[in-house]
Image (cartoon, rainbow, N blue to C red):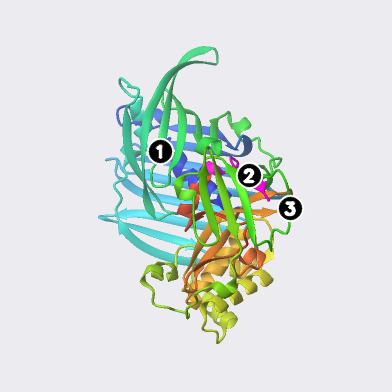
Amino acid sequence: MTTSLKALLTFLVALTFGSATLAQEIDIRALAGKDWYGLYMNGQKVGYSMQETVVSGDGAVTLIEDARFKLNMVGIKQDMRIYSKRAYRADGTLASIESSIDDISGPTKLHAAVQGDSLVLRSTVGGQDNREVFPAPAESVSDMTAQFRLISGNPVVGRSIEFSLFEPVFKREIGGVSELLAIEERLLDGVATRVYKIKTLFRDMGIESVAYFIEDGTVLEDVTAGGAITMRLEPEDVAKDVNYTNDTIVSNAAKVDQPVHNARNRTALSLRIQGPLAEDHLFNDRRQHFERDGGSFTFVGRKISASSLTTAPLFSNVPETAEWLKPSLFVQSDNPKIIEQAKKIVGDETDAFRASSLLSEWVYANVRSTFSAQMSNSLDVLDSMEGDCTEHSILYIGLARAAGIPAREVAGLIYTGYPEPGFYFHQWATAWVGEWIDVDPTFNQPIADATHIKLVEGDLFEQTRLLPVIGQLHIQVDD
């Protein structure tokens, strides 16, 4: 049940690069060097990051970030590394971006290179090599200087600068705006120092960060999504001093005032939820309904009967669902292994709901459940046949698309009594079988039960919208 964690850690690289200590208005060579940061999740240390600026003799600039995480998931200790390198030519234009994510499943590698008017993205995911071509992004060194430029010359509170960054994992440009909120005086090592408070908004996903800079461009602290992740400047030995004491699963769950009885089979569930939910978190459909109630929200979940569904045959030609039949970077539904396995499971079945149920049941029965901190993809899960809710759902989605069932990721919360009664962050799927239904192969549910609280739909990029609510929700059960 770690989908939000995986999205958060992946987005961290793109986000913290927005805090790079560069500026076109000053001598970039003076900024070459390394900084070390401790990484904290809701106040608990989970890793560290090294950020380095390298300037060549001709003025070309390279930015390197190497983030390491030590994660404890209900007693299971795992390490994860996220590395990124962005290179700019001497004229400031983007040359290349290199990203890699190393976890227990092995490396996920992406390399984007600007060639003329195009950006060529090569990726290796699940042992499968891919090549895609996009228009060259507008990103340049000036985008990486947005925050520092706010404090250069004569800084003015209220001034803002827009920027955009291309993120290979999401395969898109991420637009943002930074604004100088305040200029403060602090004592740092006994010296009165001017500190600049800058807010950055990534508009495409509604994620905010607040960073504190000093005049030479050094970031003292960067707080993302209200403290979901904090990056804090520390000496190298202090930054690297990380252990596994913080349980990232338990500490970020929404605890409840009373247990939910008969959770998997109950026909309905009523909750009161407090926390920073935004409009795009409030999904209303047949299975769940949100309403604002003053400063909180009421939630009603219902169990949907299979007999009430409107079903359709496999490979139904419905234009609005066509996007969710296509393969993607992490859902390799066009791979021969995925296609062959889907055919074996579905057999001669032509009804989309019954085929979906067969796929969900097969994933539940064959994927060994274990908590994992990894970037999941359908092919790797088919090979390893183990993982948590993310692995169950991404394999189901790959098989479903290969079988002719439009499907996409869903993330939110689910109630469970283990390790403590509460609502834990969780991933499942939604599939079109004549209508959209929620499917949870982790719990062997062809239709997800009433305790599922859907907060986002879509791929890893969409799941970053969970960041502001991680560890920030309080739930009261109204039985």
- The residue labelled by disc 2 is 475
Residue found at the far bottom of this picture: 348
Q: In which quarter of the image is residue 158?
A: top left
Three-letter code for the amino acid on which mark 3 is drawn: Tyr
Where residue 251 sits in the image (x, y, percent)?
Answer: 67, 42
Is the residue 166 above or below the residue 274 in the image? below
Question: Does label 3 or label 1 sit earlier along the sequence?
Answer: 1
Three-letter code for the amino acid on which mark 1 is drawn: Leu
- The residue labelled by disc 3 is 418
Q: Let me know if residue 21 is in the magenta part.
A: no
Where residue 365 sits in the image (x, y, percent)?
Answer: 68, 72
Between tags 3 and 1, which lies in front? 3
Would residue 349 be found to the left or right of residue 316 on screen?
right
Would residue 413 be found to the left or right of residue 61 on screen?
right
Between tags 1 and 2, which lies in front? 2
Q: In which quarter of the image is residue 256?
A: top right
In space, the residues marked 1 and 2 are separated at their CA atoms by: 28 Å
Q: What element carries label 3?
A: loop
- The residue labelled by disc 1 is 201
Q: Give the range drawn in magenta.
A: 468-479
Are the residues flagged by discs 3 and 2 in contact, CB closer than 8 Å?
no
Is the residue 92 above or below the residue 97 in the image? above
Where residue 468 sits in the image (x, y, percent)?
Answer: 52, 42
In space, the residues marked 3 and 1 are separated at their CA atoms by: 36 Å
Q: Residues within 10 Å of mark 1 (few under 14, many from 20)?
A: some
Q: Residues within 10 Å of mark 2 (few under 14, many from 20)?
A: many
Residue located 41% across and 29% down the image: 198
Three-letter code for the amino acid on which mark 2 is drawn: Ile
Is the residue 462 above or below the residue 155 in the image? below
